Image (cartoon, rainbow, N blue to C red):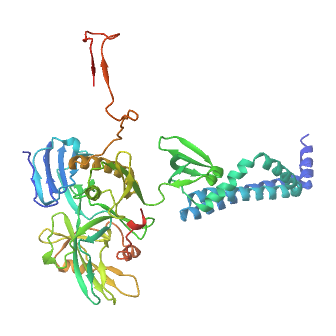
């Protein structure tokens, strides 16, 4: 049996099958190594241009694209007819395409998102009421971390169709403070006090200049919108401080912040509403059994 | 009163025996420091409505410590000295003259503006532990729109045009600025950005703080050019350097100092 082996080996070698298989393996390994290297280079170039999410996707595209070429070259070298494989793959692709319309739609949407760049990793966005920090932008979906620390996956197709608000794109933000003052107040004085409070708060930007807008006569107050600006990192702190300081200052200056007033009318006779206090039946205690009308 | 050795300097060196404390106020800040065998505790508070022009030592450890911010620094053996060194602010300043100053064509003027100093706490000759502003200036935005620009501090000033009119303050650094209007139109200084992070800090023989000077040249056919005055100018005046710039020089950054600033408020309602 040992004598037969060299003959078999010789025959197999003469046949060339093993050689071509080894060649295919080398093509595959080298091809995949090149694909990985070029993908890393593409990613590095895009990272250097501050486009991290495009880098992530480009890395995958370059790698898988070159990997497919390497596999096809390896198959060709092994003597397998690539055309037949591709034909089969084409039929398979059509079948898969019908079965995975949603995935394809998300994939295409992901490419549009990358081109448009409405947000980048690390920015805070609001999508249909879901607000959070962008963790990653992938081929099929975008991952967010919401402020209550939930992980949210939003399909790219949804993002393309929905209005997105990018909260942290610009370095400064405006807070619209809603304030109501009583009708009796002097509005010029209210305006001066508001501007003074804004000027005294170091987080409230001096420019753009704060603006007082009179919204109109409300049901129980004159409604005012006070527009003040802050650096995006100080936005919440500034807004809280301003509400606190405006209330304290209004209290100190005797400016009334009214709450809703409700008036009761007794039909067409708008005189005083008759009220009767009755003690007695079913009540505990020793209240006198009399009644009083008001 | 605790044992303390404070130099009556706006930025003192505090030398304390273990388990002793000291405190002082300058500008809007009250600072207390306490030394323990293996740590230093620093407590500070900024008052919005106070801006003391002079250094005021305090004796008692504050009763209302909950109103203070605190930091504690551990050592194998706590160093006996804590020095408070003056440093310039961590952002550019936008100087707004109380009355905008118009410079006719062909005129060159000297302006003096004061900006608040920060204090950096160092144990002996060790690395910096903490930086505290002696006054917290208001934030402001310097840019042509709300999308691009720079977050700065604002300094409202009389923009004195002679040093003899200038009233130096203990916790302010004076920046001398020469504006040379070589254009054919009057040049109005209503918003002036001082790139304070690019400037060195000096101290003169009277303990006043100065930054390296700036020179702005206004021409018709090109953007206003800003250059730093030569350092020799500082040493000629007998200033000694006490601080290095926070940031390396970037020419593009300072070219925007005088660029037209649009009043944004009308467009932003």
Q: For the view shown, which residue lies furthest in the left direction?
A: B1
Going 42% across and 57% down the picture, which residue do you hit? A173
Please name whichever residue, B259 or B46, is drawn nearer the observer in this view of the structure: B259
Q: How many marks?
A: 0
Left or right: residue A94 compared with residue A213: right
The image shows residue B169, relative to residue B78, as above or below, that is below
In which quarter of the view is residue B253 placed? bottom left
**What residue is drawn where x is 20% and y is 72%?**
B158
Q: Nearer the viewer, residue A225 or A175?
A: A225
| Residue B95 drawn at (x, y percent) | 28, 70
Q: Position of residue A170 (x, y in %)?
A: 46, 60
Q: Quadrant of residue A175?
A: bottom left
Quadrant in which the C terminus of chain B is drawn: bottom left
Coordinates of residue A117 in the picture (x, y in percent): 58, 60
Image quarter where the N terminus of chain B lies is top left
Where residue B151 sits, quadrant-wise, is bottom left
| Residue B24: % across, % down | 14, 53
- Nearest the viewer among B221 and B91 is B221
């Amino acid at each position: 049996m040992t004598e037969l082996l060299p003959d078999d080996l010789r025959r197999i070698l003469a046949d060339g099958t093993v050689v071509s298989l080894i060649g295919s393996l080398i093509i595959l390994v080298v091809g995949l190594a090149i694909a990985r290297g070029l993908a890393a280079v593409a990613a590095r170039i895009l990272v250097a241009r501050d486009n991290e999410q495009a880098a992530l996707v480009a890395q995958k595209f370059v790698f898988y694209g070159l990997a497919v070429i390497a596999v096809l070259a390896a198959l060709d070298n092994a003597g397998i007819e690539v055309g037949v494989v591709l034909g089969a793959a084409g039929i398979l692709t059509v079948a898969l395409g019908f079965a995975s319309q949603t995935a394809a739609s998300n994939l295409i949407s992901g490419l549009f998102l990358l081109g448009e760049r409405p947000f980048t990793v690390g920015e805070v966005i609001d999508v249909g009421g879901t607000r959070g920090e962008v963790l990653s932008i992938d081929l099929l979906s975008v991952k967010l971390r919401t402020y209550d620390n939930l992980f949210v996956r939003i399909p790219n197709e949804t993002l393309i169709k929905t209005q997105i608000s990018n909260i942290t794109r610009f370095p400064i933000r405006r807070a619209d403070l809603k304030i109501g003052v009583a009708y009796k107040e002097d509005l010029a004085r209210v305006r001066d006090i508001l501007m003074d409070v804004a000027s005294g708060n170091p987080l409230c930007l001096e420019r753009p200049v704060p603006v007082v807008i009179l919204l109109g006569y409300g049901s129980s107050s004159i409604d005012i919108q006070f527009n003040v600006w802050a650096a995006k990192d100080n936005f919440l702190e500034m807004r809280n401080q301003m509400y606190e300081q405006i209330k304290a200052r209004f209290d100190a200056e005797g400016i009334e912040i009214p709450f809703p007033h409700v008036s009761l009318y007794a039909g067409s006779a708008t005189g005083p509403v008759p009220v009767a206090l009755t003690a007695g039946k079913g009540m505990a205690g020793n209240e006198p059994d009399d009644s009083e009308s008001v | 009163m605790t044992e303390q050795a404070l130099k009556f300097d706006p930025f003192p060196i505090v030398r304390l025996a273990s388990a002793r404390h000291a405190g002082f106020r300058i500008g809007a800040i009250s600072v207390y420091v306490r030394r323990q065998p293996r740590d230093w505790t620093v407590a500070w508070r900024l008052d919005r409505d106070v801006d003391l022009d002079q250094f005021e030592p305090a004796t008692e450890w504050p009763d209302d410590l909950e109103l203070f911010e605190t930091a504690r620094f551990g050592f194998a053996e706590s160093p006996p000295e804590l020095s408070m060194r003056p440093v310039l602010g961590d952002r550019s300043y936008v100087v707004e003259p109380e009355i905008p100053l118009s410079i006719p064509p062909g005129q060159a003027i000297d302006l003096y503006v004061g900006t608040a100093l920060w204090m950096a706490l160092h144990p002996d000759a060790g690395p910096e532990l903490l930086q505290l502003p002696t006054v917290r200036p208001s934030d402001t935005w310097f840019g042509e729109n709300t999308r691009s620009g720079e977050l700065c501090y604002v300094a409202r000033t009389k923009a004195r045009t002679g040093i003899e009119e200038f009233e130096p303050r203990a916790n302010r650094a004076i920046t001398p600025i020469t504006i040379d209007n070589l254009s054919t139109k009057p040049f109005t200084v209503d918003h002036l950005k001082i790139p304070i992070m690019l400037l060195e800090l000096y101290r003169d023989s009277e303990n006043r703080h100065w930054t390296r000077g700036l020179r702005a040249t206004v021409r018709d056919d090109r953007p206003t050019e800003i250059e730093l005055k030569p350092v020799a100018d500082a040493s000629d005046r007998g200033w000694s350097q006490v601080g290095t710039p926070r940031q390396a020089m970037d020419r593009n950054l300072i070219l925007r100092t005088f660029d037209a600033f649009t009043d944004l408020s009308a467009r932003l309602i």
